[in-house]
Amino acid sequence: MRIGLIGLPNSGKTTIFNALTKQEAPVTAYANAMVEPNLAVVEVADDRISRLSEMYRPKKTICSSIEFIDFVGVKEGAAKEGLFSGPDTGSIKIADALALVVRNFKNEQEHPPTPIADIEKIMDELLISDLIIAENRLERIAHAYNRGKKTAALEMEEKVLRSIVEHVSENRAISDLNLDKEQEKMVRGFQFFTQKPLMIILNSDEYGFGKNSELLSDIEKKFQVIEFTGKFEMELSGLNDPEEEKLFLVDMGIRESARDRLTHLAYGLLGYISFFTVGSDEVRAWSIHEGNTALEAADAIHSDLARGFIRAECYTYDDIMAFGSEKAIRENGRFRLEGKNYVVQDGNILSIRFNV
């Protein structure tokens, strides 16, 4: 899973990035000094994988992971010159979701924050970027027609792109456009920004954190939102003692780290669930979309498992915790064999039978 952090300059994006990843990326004048994004991969905390590892004592334990991409600050009006369409934006285009960091603290010039207006500014830039991409492609299709290359596939693509242009021109995100599976597949390669799931990170200071219920409610009318106190949580992420970090979080009324809170939000926004594979060699967590089948889960592990799929041996995390062993699970009738169309549930433990 890749999450791209975007926002206006000096919104605290890199501060949030450091809090999430325990990195020490420079935060001073970052938006003006760099054009390359900061990248970091972090493990997804899950007590279930820890307990399974304690039980099976494998040679290695592998958690799911999230890649965070801290993109350069968005300057207003930049989309008129093709924002997010240049070579330096490739990493943000492949993000599975975007996290828009919004300033909710006074900056060095003591300017009061304007979170709602900032969200609208960024959305305008994203919409213009998508419009530019769609219109440029339509121009190329027109050139192809002029050269006598008018095919059914191009005509279908043109129809979908014209509906996108009309939709975006009305200041509506592509995610709100009802595209069928074939149409979605057709435009997937463009990686439109407003087609991606979007969450808002309200970046507050220590004094205002937890006192923004009305503002959060306003944002929640359109977006999923989470509040961080970026600077405070970045400083905490640098502590070497996890217990000390927890104590400081509790003092602020925060139950989980920034990373864990954002992970939960992202999993919900993207519709992800986790299943596990276990054994003496390896205990591993895998992330797939809710509604995926056993065949798709097998493919997530390795394409050979999907190609030669026979059956999925299946039981649940709750079962192994309740009965204590796979033998006891079998004796109590909780061990199942499922076919390729079985819909995998969060917390399933799978072993794929296959033959290639």
Image (cartoon, rainbow, N blue to C red):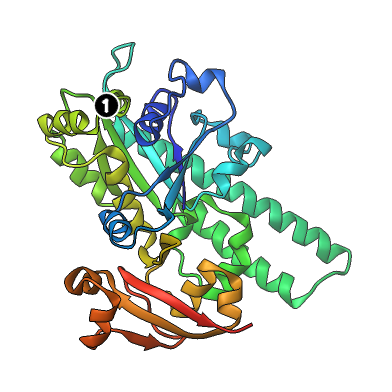
Residue 24 as seen in the image, left or right of residue 203: right
Q: Amino acid at mark 1?
A: Leu
Q: Position of residue 128 (x, y in %)?
A: 54, 44
Tell me if I can see residue 126 in this picture: yes
Identify the image quadrant of residue 323: bottom left
Q: Position of residue 353 (x, y in %)?
A: 49, 82
x 44%, y 15%: residue? 28
Identify the image quadrant of residue 236: top left
Q: How many marks?
A: 1
x 73%, y 70%: residue? 154
Which is more toward the observer, 13 or 131? 13
* In the image, farthest residue toward the top: 109
Q: Residues within 10 Å of mark 1 (few under 14, many from 20)?
A: many
Residue 309 as seen in the image, left or right of residue 246: right
Q: Quadrant of the C terminus?
A: bottom right
Residue 100 as seen in the image, left or right of residue 72: left
Give the answer, above or below, for where 311 lies relative to 125. Answer: below
x 59%, y 83%: residue? 308
Give the answer, above or below, for where 273 lies relative to 218. Answer: below
Tell me if I can see residue 223 in this picture: no
**Residue pointed to by mark 1:** 236
- Disc 1 secondary structure class: helix
Which is more toward the observer, 78 or 57? 57
Q: Position of residue 224 (x, y in %)?
A: 29, 50
Which is more toward the observer, 277 or 33? 277
x 33%, y 72%: residue? 348
* In the image, farthest residue toward the right: 147
Q: Position of residue 207 (x, y in %)?
A: 15, 23
Which is more toward the observer, 103 or 282? 282
Residue 165 as seen in the image, left or right of residue 213: right
Identify the image quadrant of residue 321: bottom left
